[in-house]
Amino acid sequence: MLGATGVATMAVDLPVARWVERGACPDWIEKLATQGETFGHGLGIILIVLIIGVLDPGHRAAIPRILAASLGSGLAANVLKLLVARVRPHHFDLGGDALDSFAGWLPMLTNASWQQGFPSSHMATAAGLAIVLANFFPRGRWLFPGLAALAGLQRVLELAHFPSDVLWGAAVGCIFAPLCVYGGRMSQAFDALERGLLARSAGDDQSSRPSAPQRTTSPRDDMPHAA
């Protein structure tokens, strides 16, 4: 659905980019979206897992899965950049046609950063992070997608991506992250890893607990008392 919506959104890619270029977006929306970039950035994800590790010991074992689902989604989007070249809005003639922004097939490593607009790896990362966090923290199942949407909005307002690139990036995250969460060999591998980490943590807790003081008795203590 996201992929198909991205295709349809190409019709408004250029009008939205021109609207942003004119500075028509309210300042408060830009400031809010700027904060949302953290949710789709590698350093932001490192900070999130550090917070989980410090404040929520019960979910420390889930950190490898969280990193894989989020950063893996971003990596999958970067692989697609090697297959299709698309000029970013800040380097494209916004008076042209949206299809003209696609600069060629299979550029591999020859295209520059400004030709790597398809798809948004920030949005793919944010979508993957939202999915895996919602799995472990169900109360945030509405919060995390909202934060991911802010990350995508920031990429559009920075003219780093067209809206369609953001939707395609979200599609990548929604395809890759569930492989780490909802069954399949990759998810099963993380299940086994988490069981091992939890068992090891439980064993460490047991060994670190102080043993109960032993009562020492003397032969006199065991002798029956005379009436």
Image: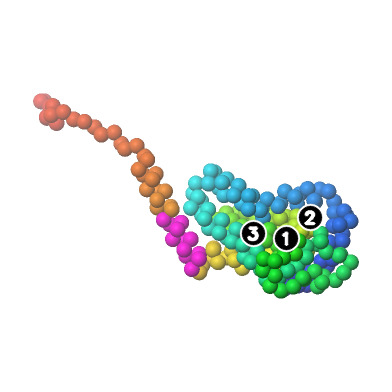
Residue type (three-letter) at the residue carrying disc 3 = Thr
The one of 139 and 99 positioned closer to us in this rendering: 99
Query: Does the image show residue 166?
Result: no
Q: Is residue 215 shown left or right of residue 24?
A: left
Q: Say the numbered circle drawn on residue 125.
A: 3
Tell me whether circle 1 and circle 2 mark residues in contact (CB < 8 Å).
Answer: no
Q: Which residue is mark 1?
A: 113
Q: How is the image coloured?
A: rainbow
Quarter of the image holding residue 148?
A: bottom right
For the residues marked 1 and 3, what is the alpha-carbon distance in whole angstroms?
A: 18 Å
Q: In the current view of this chain or complex, which residue is farthest to the left? A: 226
Residue 38: % across, % down: 68, 50
Residue 36: % across, % down: 71, 51
| Mark 3 neighbour density, 10 Å: few (under 14) some (14–19) many (20 or more) | many
Query: Does the image show residue 47?
Result: yes
**Residue 84 vertical placement versus 201 (above, below):** below
Quarter of the image holding residue 193?
A: bottom left
Residue type (three-letter) at the residue carrying disc 1 = Ser
Residue 147: % across, % down: 69, 54
Earlier sequence position, callout 1 versus callout 2:
1
